[in-house]
Image (spheres, rainbow, N blue to C red):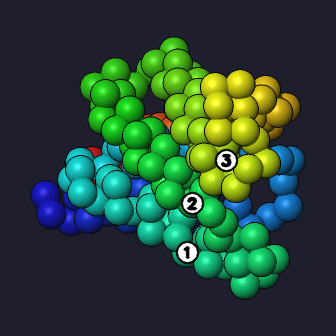
Amino acid sequence: MKETTTNHFKLILFLILGAAAVRLIPHYPNFTPIGAMALFAGTYISNKRLAFAVPLLAMLVSDVMLQLISGQGFHNTLFFVYGSFMLITSLGFLLRRRVQRQTIMVSSLVGSIIFFFITNFGVWAMSHGFYPYTLEGLMQCYIAAIPFFKGTVMGDLFYNFILFGSYALVKWKFPRLAMQ
């Protein structure tokens, strides 16, 4: 039993690290796998601490690599990005016993909305006066971010399809590998 659990964890780790590596490839703005990594980890990593830790560490490593490659890995809203990431992982906990196309798609969209509102609140809060610190300033920030929301939604849907689909395919072809 322990061998199958280890293989299951290795499979999930491989998929999450692969998704994190994709962040290093040039992409359409916000079309990244970060929301999908969090949702997938929350859904399939049974140990809740690891479910948070694995995608956060994958994000941290890819942020370090992005910083080294382009100088764009770390920024003043990182706390908000990682916070939204943790909430999306928690959303994966709710998905655990309801893994179906429809529930994955709805969870993906909810995750995109969570990311949009939290990270753009962070942009407003950390803007150092670029946006007025008023409700109107916050709304200006959200409105300015709408074009990027498309990339977030499309990226989350696409990468959730890749992660959950790959996992389902492996589970179907090699059932022992995907056993928990």
Q: Residue, x 64% and y 70% (percent of image)?
A: 74
Sequence-earlier tag: 1 or 3 = 1
Front label number (1 vs 3):
3
- Based on the displayed image, in which of its 4 quarters is residue 117 positioned? top right
The quarter of the picture where the N terminus appears is bottom left
User: In the image shown, does 142 or 24 lie closer to the viewer?
Assistant: 142
* Residue 136 appears in view: yes
* Residue 15 appears in view: no
Q: Position of residue 82 (x, y in %)?
A: 49, 55
Q: Which residue is mark 3?
A: 123
The kind of residue tagged 2 is Leu
Q: Is residue 16 left or right of residue 139?
A: left
Decide: few, some or many residues near mark 1? Use Cα within 10 Å; few <14, some 14-19, many ≥20: some
CA separation in Å, label 1 and label 2: 13 Å
Front label number (2 vs 3):
3
Q: Residue, x 77% and y 77% (percent of image)?
A: 71
Q: Which residue is mark 2?
A: 78
- Based on the displayed image, in which of its 4 quarters is residue 105 positioned? top right
**Residue 26 vertical placement versus 180 (above, below):** below
Sequence-earlier tag: 2 or 3 = 2
Q: Position of residue 90 (x, y in %)?
A: 34, 38
Q: Residue, x 40% and y 47% (percent of image)?
A: 86
The kind of residue tagged 3 is Val
**Residue 11 vertical placement versus 132 (above, below):** below
Q: Position of residue 17 (x, y in %)?
A: 54, 65
Q: Is residue 94 left or right of residue 142?
A: left
CA separation in Å, label 1 and label 3: 22 Å
Label 3 element class: helix
Decide: few, some or many residues near mark 3? Use Cα within 10 Å; few <14, some 14-19, many ≥20: many
**Residue 6 vertical placement versus 141 (above, below):** below
Q: Which residue is mark 1?
A: 61
Front label number (1 vs 2):
2
